[in-house]
Image (spheres, rainbow, N blue to C red):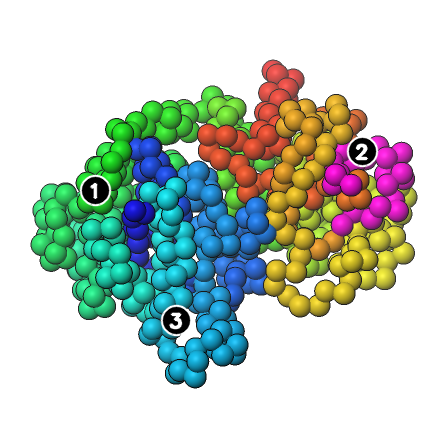
Amino acid sequence: MTKHIFVTGGVVSSLGKGLTSASIGAILERRGLRVRMQKLDPYINVDPGTMSPYQHGEVYVLDDGAETDLDLGHYERFTNSPLSRDSNYTSGRIYLKVIEKERQGKYLGGTVQVVPHITDEIKASVRKLAGPDVDVVITELGGTVGDIEGLPFLEAIRQIPLDIGRENCLFVHLTLVPYLKAARELKTKPTQHSVQQLREIGIQPDVLIVRTERPLGRENAEKIALFCNVEKKAVIEEMDKEFSIYEVPVGLVEHGLDQLIVDRLGLQTRPGNMDDWEDLVHRIKNPQHEVTVAVVGKYIEHRDAYKSIYEALDHAGIAHSTRVVVKRIEAEDLERQDPATALAGVDGILVPGGFGMRGVEGKIRACQFARTQKIPYFGICLGMQIAVIEVARNLLGLPDANSTEFAADTGNPVICLLEEQKSVTTKGGTMRLGAQPCVLAEGSLAARCYGVPEVSERHRHRYEFNPDYRDQFTNAGLAQSGKSPDGKLVEVVEIPAHPWFVAVQFHPEFKSKPMQAHPLFHGFIGAALARHQERASNAT
Ligand code: GLN
């Protein structure tokens, strides 16, 4: 019988519920359990695909093409849980399904209501992940207890124990215990209130995970236990981590959370060990080298907009025992100033994905600087299209070269819509999305990085490399080293005469893990490190 863990959050948002849920998944996998991860988001958008990065941060794309919440990135980095469209539901998607059924007459003339119709649909979406090959489903609820829009989800998870037995369910509630400077005290009252609200709805949490910037202490833990009606040992402290998010699973095991969950749910498991997580944390804390990489984007002040990119850079750094210092550069700034000033001293330049005009010319200048100064360049999605435009303008002698996304009537559309995409007018789920195979040219830098001739990577874009210009680019020194198996779509370009210049139409950052850095990020940081060391030795 599959067991269910529900993770809710209280007091404030941004407590790291996604990270904590992913960490719970990680520590249960350590015990030999087969875990499935899921996120329920109360907002009305059907998926985050159409939301601005300012609103939502990164859109995380899965193999099946689902555009999902960025917490699914944490799930994938921390666990081996397979993820699909069923791993992320929003209110909008649940309502859409119910309304479609209503229009088809499936409710046989009944009045369609939040309870039971919406809640039944939510319950079905949770239970869908259960199965003979799954020991535990971990479902994280977005939002904070007390939000109006979260109520149907809370009501649904309240009901699940009635359907499958209370002993098969575990409620974990994540809260904050703030430190008040004036009183020089940690305060437990917000946690008490948050749990009260949950209990009013009919959910008694079994475990409280308490975020705090100072050690909780026995007295506070006992107070929380008493007032929130949970066992003392089920009040788990989660201190702010100084170095890395990858310290969280180790901390939770130190506080006995894995054993507590296993006992409460009556799971048969082997004893776990955290050796490789501990080793990972040790490597993060003790780097041997340091490199600086510029990320030139347009949501640069919004850390979550390029979440997986920053994580993937860290993973590659860990693999090279190197601390990667990221210099975030606003692309538009490079339009007003000489890129040599902003990019002085960097060991690598990365241009990530993006949509729309703003900042494009600045990104092109960053790419030109990397190409001419022989600084390692890594272009991702839009960053690949930028590289193609830059080379067209400056090496092919086509000054008006552009993507039709930015200049619909350019005389040289080196990036454009292919015929079959031109008829698509609706937004949401209409791009080239999800995992696609890519064949790598033998001996190319990309093939050497990956070490295999064919790979599968995830896409999220509309525009493509224009095949009419292939030969011109090859002759100018921009090799097309990755293509779709039918040879029609260009997926990877590189400059063989440059130390490390690789640009890809897909999003490799979604497949990087802390213990398995993505091969292209690994190669990029390796090249940045080589450049850094060479410059250091030239300076002495
Ligand atoms: N805007 C570009 C396109 O739609 C690139 C998208 C991206 O970088 N994800 O093709």
Q: Nearer the viewer, mark 2 or mark 3?
A: 3
Looking at the image, can residue 479 be seen?
yes
Q: Are the two marked residues, 2 and 3, in contact with CB atoms closer than 8 angstroms?
A: no
- Check disc 2 and give the amino acid type: Ala
Task: Check the image and report above or below for 115 versus 153.
Answer: below
Residue at 52 percent across and 79 percent down: it is 103
- Check disc 1 and give the amino acid type: Gly
Q: In this figure, which residue is indicated by the disc labeled 2?
A: 479
Distance between mark 3 and mark 1 Cα atoms: 31 Å
Q: Magenta span covers which residues? A: 464-486
Does residue 518 appear to the left or right of 108 in the view shown? right
Task: Check the image and report above or below for 82 versus 359.
Answer: above
For marks 1 and 2, the one nearer the N-term is 1
- Check disc 3 and give the amino acid type: Ile
Looking at the image, can residue 336 be seen?
no
User: Which quarter of the figure has residue 506?
Assistant: top right
Q: Nearer the viewer, mark 1 or mark 2?
A: 1
Residue at 19 percent across and 59 percent down: it is 204
Mark 1: few, some, or many residues within 10 Å (few <14, many ≥20)? Answer: few
Residue nearest the observer in this picture, 298 or 414: 414
User: Which quarter of the figure has residue 496?
Assistant: top right
Residue nearest the observer in this picture, 360 or 343: 360
Task: Check the image and report above or below for 402 versus 488.
Answer: below
For marks 2 and 3, the one nearer the N-term is 3
- Which of the image's four quarters has the C terminus? top right
Distance between mark 1 and mark 2 Cα atoms: 57 Å
Q: Is residue 338 magenta?
A: no
Q: Is residue 466 magenta?
A: yes
Q: In this figure, which residue is indicated by the disc labeled 3?
A: 118
Residue at 75 percent across and 25 percent down: it is 442
Residue 143's x, y, as percent? 37, 61
Q: Which mark is residue 266?
A: 1
